[in-house]
Image (cartoon, coloured by chain):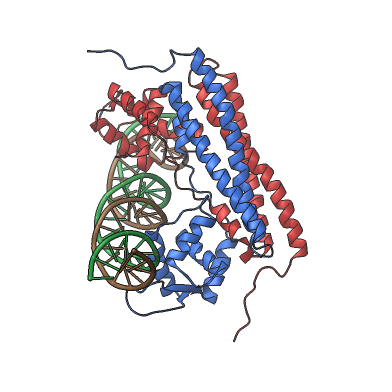
Chain colours: A red, B blue, C green, D brown
Amino acid sequence: MSRNRTAYVILGMLSIEPNKSGYDIRKAVESSVGYFWGESYGQIYPTLKRLTDEGLIVPSSPITGPRQRRQQYSLTDAGHACLREWLALPFQNDPPRNEFLLKLFFGREAPPSVSIGHIRELQQRNQHMLATMLELESFANRVGAQNPHKPYWMLTLSLGIALTRAALDWGESALATLSQADGEDHSNPPTEKHLA
Amino acid sequence: MSRNRTAYVILGMLSIEPNKSGYDIRKAVESSVGYFWGESYGQIYPTLKRLTDEGLIVPSSPITGPRQRRQQYSLTDAGHACLREWLALPFQNDPPRNEFLLKLFFGREAPPSVSIGHIRELQQRNQHMLATMLELESFANRVGAQNPHKPYWMLTLSLGIALTRAALDWGESALATLSQADGEDHSNPPTEKHLA
DNA sequence: CGTGGCATGTAAACGGTTACATGATTTA
DNA sequence: TAAATCATGTAACCGTTTACATGCCACG
């Protein structure tokens, strides 16, 4: 039943702003929902073709020949309806896969410095993410005050910001905990046995 | 270069407690790291065979015939080393894909009640998750006080708890925001046009 | 003895990324 | 016109899930 989610990303982006090419869509995804969703060209272009075949989108501007530059698309009424239908369906939580937490969970197999290093790296990435999202937030506040999508965009942003802040707080105390343990507990990692 | 992550989950679980079967490993994953990692049998069993071929694990108990019941495995020294090597490698953050946020981002395409419903559903799932994790936490505190893995397990748990709490807080205020908007703004969702 | 659940395993399909190929446009 | 970059597209591969097949064991 459930179709490719990439299709709905495309429909959604075109519903916000018509006349977008595959390239445009990719860019828009990256710069708006990039912190919780990713798409690759290898997924976008075939899906654009499929959606066209199904009549959910239409090529809107220059159709000059194969490999033309900047082929743009817009939603049809059917496409619009399809998007709304999907929106009303219950969301699935995508299977959780957090390699950072996985390594931390098995952390006792290695010296504490390994886990400490991972947490420091996580902190850096989160600080960077936080800065990006705050920038996006203030940008959205300055521009487009009356954009009807804005309330929803701000909601997604504020969740991202809240989660990242919580993670940063956690990281601080986790580093404190592990540094302390590192000082006390040196025999922890079970080192290679010296067998013949 | 990078091999299947399932392999490391298996190595990690066997490093914590040897003599586990594929079934055991699946159960252990579900009940310990289930809130940030998932594995399916279709992934575990082939990987067990491959790891055996590569000498990273060994079948430890009854080898009676094909399809024997409860074939168990343990780590070899090579397997142990392989696990530690992987632990020290930088973690990759898995591509973010949050369908809830995606639907919320496009939320203005539908009536506010749709987004409100999704957020309510999210709140319920998160409350359930929080309860599970808090239970796990108190269990870990009661039992296994001197388990050497415990500090690391508690760290992963506390991050999960912190993130879930942050999400719940966000959900409350998001519901308030949207309910308010729902009252004021009824013309928002562009409804189906009445064309012949 | 037979039924239901436990445990193992496999094949096929799927969603997605990666790497590559290619044309078209800008810029120097 | 040469080089760089923009934009489109495709084929191969990969990890994972799903559905199914199959025996084994416990329990009525």
Residue B37 spot, x, y in % from top left: 50, 53
Q: How many marks?
A: 0
- Relative to A81, say whether A184 is above or below: below
Kindly indicate the quadrant of the structure image that contains residue B65: bottom left
| Side of A110 where D18 appears, left or right | left
| Side of A91 where A4 appears, left or right | left
Residue B152 spot, x, y in % from top left: 64, 58
Q: Give the residue displayed 57% in from the left and 53% down from the top.
A: A101
Kindly indicate the quadrant of the structure image that contains residue A137: top right
In the image, A83 versus B135, the foreground residue is B135
Residue A190 spot, x, y in % from top left: 64, 71
- Quadrant placement of the C terminus of chain A: bottom right
In the image, C28 versus B156, the foreground residue is B156
| Side of B105 where B160 appears, left or right | right
- Can residue B156 be seen in this snapshot? no
Q: Give the residue displayed 51% in from the left and 13% down from the top.
A: B184
Residue A74 spot, x, y in % from top left: 33, 24
